[in-house]
Every structure is written in C-alpha cells, then in structure tokens.
Amino acid sequence: MCLPLAAWAGGTILVYGDSLSAAYGLAQDAGWETLLQARLKQKGMNYTVVNASISGETTSGGATRIAAALKAHRPKLVIVALGANDGLRGLPLAQMRANLARIVRASQKAGSRVLLVGMRLPPNYGETYTRQFARVYADIAREHRTALVPFLLEGMAERREMFQPDNIHPTAEAQPLLLENVWRALAPLLT
C-alpha cells in the first residue's frame, strides 16, 4: 500500500539561525519560518516548526547552545542558518567551519536530518575572504552529507527594495522568496 507523502511526514523542524531567520524588524508572523509552518499545514504535513533563531547569533553561540536545543525540541530536521554574523564581523573561517561542523554533527548524532543554509558576503570583504566564506557551506554539506541551500538571499540580494533601511534584513515582502529558497532543498527531506 502506498501512502501519500503527508501520511509519512511528522515531527519537529528546528530553525536554528540568526536575525535572518528570527524575523528581525518584522511582525513575528511575517518571517519565512512562519510561512513555512503555514505551507506545511496547507500541504497536510504534520510538522511543527520551532524557531530557535537569535538575532546577532554567531556560529560560536550556536555551537554552544545546540545540545540544549536538540534536547528540548527533539527535532526530526534541523535547518542550520548561521554564519552571516561571523562573516560580517570578519571572524576566522576555520572557527566558523569548526562551529558549523559541531552543530551538524550534534544534530545528526541526535537523529536529526540537517539542511544547511548558506550565506554570501558583499564584495567589500575582499574576493578571497568572500569566496572562502561561501565555500565553507558547500564543504560542510559535502563532508557531512547534508542538504544545502547555497545562498538564502538568492534572487533578491541585488534588489534594494527587498531590504529594510539597514540594507541587511529582508522586508516582509521578501519572506516568501526566502521560503522558496529554503523549500527547494527542504521538500525532499520531508518524508
């Protein structure tokens, strides 16, 4: 007997990120993670989205609190969307890589599937640093066999109207685009 996808689905999806996933500057119900919950419900998929994102979070902070988050929420799937603040602060990429690897390993050890969400930096950080920064995500995904969203802001990064006045945080109108970028890689994991 073949059951529909929704019959197999269920559990908690933990969104583990920074301000880009914490609906910074927006109504809490306007963020892409809230839109994700609505999409799952609309599709009849029995998942609960828990947003454990913290504005300003770095990979170091994320690595420090991952064990407690996994224990508290027991997620079936973890969406790791950290690293932007590491890059904006120019932190060492080896440290960022180690922290992301720690988060991914802990999540996998807890029995969770992982979706790693990448970020890119503006060119003013220098070609070498920005290229190596973006490569960290691809390397971690390959090494730990996780799904990857190469760039959360794909398709909107050059569109000024999609950002709040700080030129960093996406507007409410941009949130559906962020959801689509995540959904393409997430949907195959929801079985």
Image (tube, helix red, strand yellow):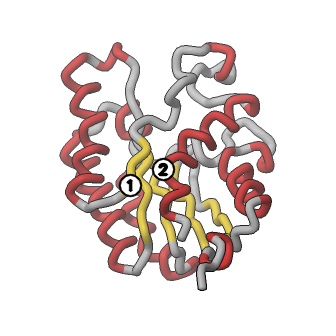
Q: Which residue is mark 1?
A: 147
Residue 186 in the image: state x and y as whole percent: 52, 55
Could you give the CA–CA distance between mark 1 and mark 2, rounded to whole angstroms? Answer: 7 Å
Left-right relation of 50 to 142: right
- The amino acid type found where label 1 is placed reads Ala
Q: Amino acid at mark 2?
A: Ala
Give the residue number, with chain letter if any, for mark 2. Answer: 185
Q: Residue at image x 25%, y 42%?
A: 136
Horizontal side, residue 43 vs residue 15: left or right? right
Cβ atoms at labels 1 and 2 below 8 Å apart = yes
**Of 191 and 115, which appears nearest the observer?**
191
**Is disc 2 placed on a helix, strand or loop?**
helix
Q: At which x and y percent is residue 116?
A: 40, 52
Residue 19: x and y in percent read 58, 43
Q: Residues within 10 Å of mark 1 (few under 14, many from 20)?
A: many
The residue sitting at 39% across, 30% down in the picture is: 120
Place residue 41 in its image quadrant: bottom right
